[in-house]
Image (cartoon, rainbow, N blue to C red):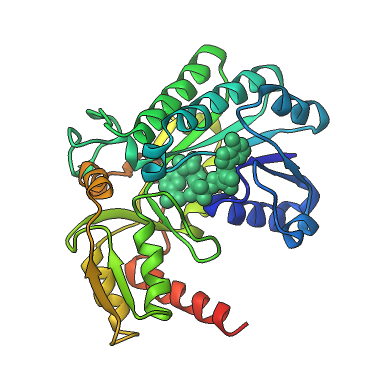
Amino acid sequence: MILVLGALGQLGLELTQNLRQSLGAQAVLAADIRTPSDHFLAEGPFERVDCCDAAALEALFRQYPIDQLYYLPALLSSKAEKFPKQTVETNFIGLFHSLELVRKYPCRVFYPSTIGVFSADSPTLDTPQNCMMRPKTIYGTTKLAGELLCEYYHHKYSMDIRSIRLPGVISHQVCPQGGTTDYAVEMFYAAQNTKVYTSYLEADTTLDMVYIDDAIRGILQLMQTDRCCLHSGVVYNLTAMQFSVAELHAALREYYPDFELCFEVDPLRQQIANSWPERINDLWAREEWGWNPQYQFKDMVRTMLFHLQKQTHV
Ligand SMILES: NC(=O)c1ccc[n+]([C@@H]2O[C@H](COP(=O)([O-])OP(=O)(O)OC[C@H]3O[C@@H](n4cnc5c(N)ncnc54)[C@H](O)[C@@H]3O)[C@@H](O)[C@H]2O)c1
């Protein structure tokens, strides 16, 4: 059975749906600290759990025959700065409890890392897998520490742990919250509804992004790859597209010509964005497990608008 911790979030919800579609609803146990909708509860097994509570986590491992764990809980970059203690607990201590449990109840683990592990000291373009990484945010610090913890358990106990450094994820089912790349999704909603968006990032800020279907396909592809093909070890850079705030605005204006863009730059999020790469190098993911994104910028814009228009007409 697969355990998806943090199953109600932007990534978790669609990952859980995808896994359930291919393996059957009963094969995927969703868990989260929040209470789901009745609709979600009807779709398959769910347990309410705090990933920082080691005893509660162990109860899940005792009750269910878990053979894969997706550890998704986290406070994202901008929210994390407001709640550093909760961030350390959720992003790092919960992961530590989980990895300790996996020593006792062996299973394959997926840990989503982030481009937030890079920093102003890292190369901005073609950022390699291994380079200077000195994140100044609590999000980047805990996620990089999480990567190292995964590598430690992998090397020390031969545990099968796999991780991807995801860029900003663009999706339409769950609105992202608390991240630095949230503007990309917010702009789609604004273009459709209010026809005006006030950006917290400057017009020429460019960041790495991936469309949700590609992100999930990549995660599942990595999890299904034979361990012997993963020469690099545990963590892989991944990207699909890069665009600036102004470029997304221009693309959306092709569909909504009266869509306006204003600016009220948030110094915290701008500083975080400035410390992240514009385009990371994901050659190792492409070579070792066949990463090949299907959605480029224009495909992503067209697909997002298609889904959002469908939601409006339901
Ligand atoms: N969304 C992105 O753009 C992005 C980019 C890079 C990496 N990631 C990583 O992917 C993972 C998932 O991100 P997301 O965007 O889905 O985040 P999210 O905030 O949308 O979802 C996180 C989920 O975890 C749950 N959660 C929080 N604290 C918990 C706790 N103590 N116990 C149990 N559940 C708890 C939340 O209720 C939420 O449903 C995170 O680890 C994040 O660092 C996300």
Q: Is residue 1 visible?
A: yes
Q: Is residue 232 visible?
A: no
Tell me the quarter of the image containing the N terminus.
top right
Residue, far bottom: 257
Residue 104: give x, y in percent of width and height.
70, 17
**On the rendered structure, is 264 left or right of 193?**
left
Residue that appears at 40% across and 66% down: 186
Please tell me which residue lies in front, 43 or 186.
186
**On the rendered structure, is 187 left or right of 245?**
right
How many marks can you see? 0
Residue 3 lies, with reference to residue 146, above or below; the image says below
Residue that appears at 43% across and 72% down: 189
Residue 90 lies, with reference to residue 200, above or below; the image says above
Please tell me which residue lies in front, 38 or 97.
38
Residue 153: give x, y in percent of width and height.
52, 18
Residue, far top: 156
Residue that appears at 26% across and 29% down: 133
Residue 91 lies, with reference to residue 47, above or below; the image says above
Q: Which of the 4 image quarters holds residue 128?
A: top left
Residue 48: give x, y in percent of width and height.
72, 41
Tell me the quarter of the image containing the C terminus.
bottom right
Residue 3: give x, y in percent of width and height.
69, 39
Q: Which of the 4 image quarters holds residue 183?
A: bottom left
